[in-house]
Amino acid sequence: MDFLELAKQRYSERFFDSCPVEQEKLDRILEAGRIVPTACNYQPQHWENI
């Protein structure tokens, strides 16, 4: 898939469901966010426990 196809399929969620998300899925999302590059490393990541 090229970028143009990906951009055309993009969707912005406006409303969120109140159903809980499994911890396994949250862990995968956080791990993906931890390892992806930032723009020239100009955006340091900061994680807070809520």
Image (tube, grey):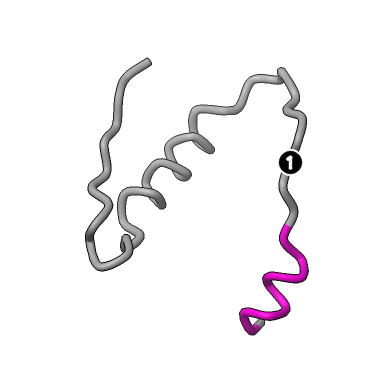
Left/right of residue 40 with respect to residue 4 in the rendered view: left
- What residue is shown at x 41% (from left), y 52% (from top)? 32
Amino acid type, callout 1: Glu
> Where, quadrant-wise, is the C terminus in this rendering?
top left
Residue 29 location, x and y as percent?
Answer: 47, 44
Residue 17 location, x and y as percent?
Answer: 75, 24
Examine the residues drawn in magenta and state their main secondary structure.
Answer: helix
- What residue is shown at x 61% (from left), y 27% (from top)? 21
Is residue 19 in the magenta section?
no
Which residue lies under the disc numbered 1?
13
Mark 1: give few (<14), some (14-19) or many (20+) Cα within 10 Å: few
Query: Is 27 placed above or below 12 here?
Result: above
Q: Depth check: give the residue in front, 40 or 28.
A: 40
Query: Is 48 placed above or below 45 here?
Result: above
- What residue is shown at x 77% (from left), y 30% (from top)? 15
> Where, quadrant-wise, is the N terminus in this rendering?
bottom right
Q: Depth check: give the residue in front, 27 or 50.
A: 50
Left/right of residue 1 with respect to residue 34 in the rendered view: right
Residue 37 location, x and y as percent?
Answer: 32, 63
Query: Is 26 placed above or below 19 here?
Result: below
Left/right of residue 4 with respect to residue 25 in the rendered view: right
Which secondary structure lies at badge 1? Answer: loop
Query: Is 47 placed above or below 5 here?
Result: above
Q: Which residues are magenta?
A: 2-10
Residue 7 location, x and y as percent?
Answer: 69, 70
